[in-house]
Image: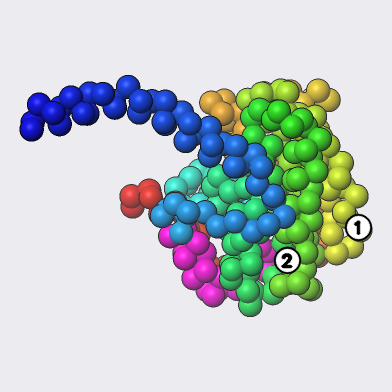
Amino acid sequence: MRVRSLLHVQRFVPAIPVLATFVAGFAAARLLSAQADQPVPRADKNSRTAHEQLLAKAKQGRIDVYFEGDSITRRWGATDYPQLLENWKKNFFGWNAADFGWGADRIENILWRLENGEIDGINPKVIVLLAGTNNVGNEVPAAGADSVVENATKGLQAVVRVIQSKAPDAVIILMGILPRNDNMDVIPEIDGINANLAHLADGRRIRYLNINDQLADADGRLREGMMNANDKLHPTVRGYQLWADALKPLFTELLGPPSKEDHAPAPTGDPSVSR
C-alpha cells in the first residue's frame, strides 16, 4: 500500500507545474476581463483586515481631506513607511487629512470599498483620488490599449459617482495616473486615460490635477529620483513632495490655511507588518 501511494504521488507531481501555470493564467485572464465599473471585493485575509481597520478609521477623529487610491496613495500616510509618513505629516498637518488607500487595489476594488462603508458618514470637504495604475498593469493586453483606456475610464467615472452620492459637498481632486517605467509600452494607455479624466473635471466640484510633467519628460521617461528605483512605479519622498506642492495651493483655496491643531484619525498600516 505504501508503494502504491508513492507511485501515485510520483505520477502526478509532474502535472503540478502545468496545473499551477493554468490556474495563474486563468486568474490573469479574469483580471484583464474584469469590468472596472463593477465593484469587486478583495478576497485575501490581509485586505479584509485592512478594510475593517479603515471602517474603524472612518469613525474616528475629524476628516476634512480624504485620500483614496491604491498603494501609491496608501504608502504616503502609512505607519509601515515612516519616512513617507513623516513627509505626509509635514505637508498636511492642520488640514485633518486621512489616508484610505490600499495596496494593489484595482479600480473595481476601490469602488467596492467605497460602496461598503469606508466613506459613509464622513462628509469630507476635499477628496483626493488617485487610482488606475493597477488596471493598466505593466503589459499591453491582447485586446489592445484602447480596451484598457475605456475600462479604466468607466471605472473611475463610477468611483466619482459613488463619491458624489456619499459625499455630495466634497470637492474631488481627480489625479492623473502617474507615469510608470517598468514597461514604457503602457505609457500611451496612461496618457489616454488621463485625457479622458481631464474631460470629467468641471473646474468646480471636480478638479483635475496632473503632475506627470514634473515626474517625467514628454515621452514619459521618469526624471531622476522621482520614483522607486526598484519598481519604477512608487514615488520617492521627492516625488511625493512634488505631489504635495501641487495639492497645497488647492487645499488652501478650498479649506483655508492649515490650523495649528490636527484632529484626523491616527494613521494605519499594513496589517501583515509586525509592530
Give residue 260's quadrant in the image. bottom right
Q: Amino acid at mark 1?
A: Gly
Q: Nearer the viewer, residue 74 or 4?
A: 4
Indicate which disc residue 122 carries: none
Circle 1 crowding by C-alpha within 10 Å: few under 14, some 14–19, many from 20: few
* Residue 180 placement (x, y as % from top left): 68, 30
Q: Residue at x 68, y 57 (%)?
A: 38
- Residue corresponding to mark 1: 203
Compared across the picture, whether 10 is left or right of 73 comes to left
Residue 191 in the magenta stretch? The answer is no
CA gap between label 2 and label 1 equals 19 Å
Q: Earlier in the sequence, mark 2 or mark 1?
A: 2
Compared across the picture, whether 136 is left or right of 51 comes to right
Q: Residue at x 71, y 23 (%)?
A: 184
* Residue 31 placement (x, y as % from top left): 60, 42
* Residue 196 placement (x, y as % from top left): 86, 45
Compared across the picture, whether 143 is left or right of 269 comes to right
Q: Is residue 262 above or below residue 141?
A: below
Residue 192 visible, this orientation:
yes
What's drawn in magenta, residue-wise?
49-67
Q: Is residue 137 above or below residue 38?
A: above
Q: Nearer the viewer, mark 2 or mark 1?
A: 2
- Residue corresponding to mark 2: 162
Q: Secondary structure at mark 2?
A: helix
Q: Nearer the viewer, residue 134 or 217?
A: 134
Residue 64 in the magenta stretch? The answer is yes
Give residue 195's quadrant in the image. top right
Q: Residue at x 66, y 42 (%)?
A: 33
Circle 2 crowding by C-alpha within 10 Å: few under 14, some 14–19, many from 20: some
